[in-house]
Amino acid sequence: MTPAPDQEETVRAFNVVLVLSGGNALGAFEAGVYEALHEHGLQPDWIIGASIGAINGALIAGSAPDRRIETLRTFWRPAPSGAMTPPWLSALETSRRTSAVGWAATLGRPGIFGPMLSALTPWSDNQPSIFETNQLATTLETLVDFDRLNAGPCRYTATAVDLETGDDVVFDSAAIQIRSDHIRASAALPVAFPPVEIDGRWLVDGGLSANLPLDPVLSDPPPRATLCIAVDLLPLNGTKPATLGETASRMQDLIFAAQTRRSIARWKAAYTGREGITLSLVRLAYSEQDEEVAGKALDFSGPTVEQRWSAGYRAGMLAVEGVQSETVSIGVLGFNVVQL
């Protein structure tokens, strides 16, 4: 079932839509999910992303199929920060992860955002934030083929929010020419990252409105049988926090994950009883978070990235196996929601 490396598309009786949520460093999980789908011919016809999901989506849609995994690995491979981790600290997983969060919060993550307070020197009233993200634009220009992103076989969509009006903003390659600033705007989470100005509007992270951006695909029922794979990085269920940092992290999980629960319930109710719809929504959640720490979204360390990538690959294989075994029913009339 694995396609040839240079194969642009796999002939299928259904379309595949990949919806990728926000979650900053947790986004390595999405890369693992994609690798499993890629290996088994489930190349997406459309990718919709918010925040880090928009970044991962651009790396995929903006690369030739035989280079997509390499492009994702180039982005997620940790760049040297100059900070040495003592051997005894590496042996303690919690301490290692907490240390990685601290280094990223202070020094930034090369290729994505700059050191703490880098956006405040010189101070700019229209970009108040802790970090700068100009280097993310450079990274995207280097890794993403924007000609392919805008005119290739995979449609691409990124979401954002108007900072002043609160309106949802959708950037779709079917309607406009996507550039690096559109993607950077989708990932501009206040207060950490500066808003991005596009056409006179100051835009921020799309995850503030819908961290798992299902609306672009579900607001207009697909005319063809569709498998929608939605990758959700922040868990609704979790253990009772024991520290202030864990409480803040859990609060973030609840805010964003509750959005997803309500969104899926809303669309399930909207589709109930409607005829002529053949759509299966498969939600893949990053649930293996027992070893995650407070500030997990800033842990870009190599071992953590690999662990999340592997967890994503396992989750992606659940979707693959569901399709192969027909546990995930795509050709059945109706709107089916499957949690894997």
Image: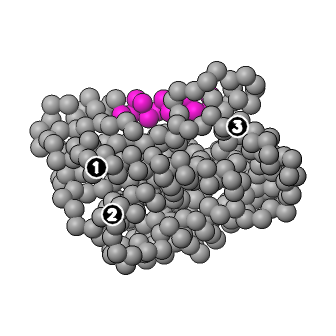
Magenta segment: does it hold 258? yes
Please tell me which of labels 3 and 2 falls first in the chain. 2
Position of 83 compared to 32: left or right?
Answer: right
Q: Quadrant of the N terminus?
A: bottom left
Which residue matches tag 1?
323
- Mostly what secondary structure, the magenta segment? helix
Which residue matches tag 3?
293
- Disc 1 marks which amino acid? Val
Mark 1, secondary structure of its residue: helix
Please tell me which of labels 1 and 2 falls first in the chain. 2
Residue sitting nearer the eye, 304 or 212: 304
Mark 1 vs mark 2, CA separation in Å: 11 Å
Mark 3 vs mark 2: give the one in front. 2
Q: Which mark is residue 41?
A: 2
Name the residue rendered at 79%, 42% in the picture.
92
Q: How dense is the environment of label 2, judged by Cα within 10 Å: few (below 14), some, or many (20 and up)?
A: some
Residue 248 found in image quarter: top right
Residue 338 found in image quarter: top left
Residue 164's place in the image compared with 127, above or below, is: above
In the image, the segment drawn in magenta is 251-264
User: Are the residues tagged 3 and 2 within 8 Å (C-beta)?
Assistant: no
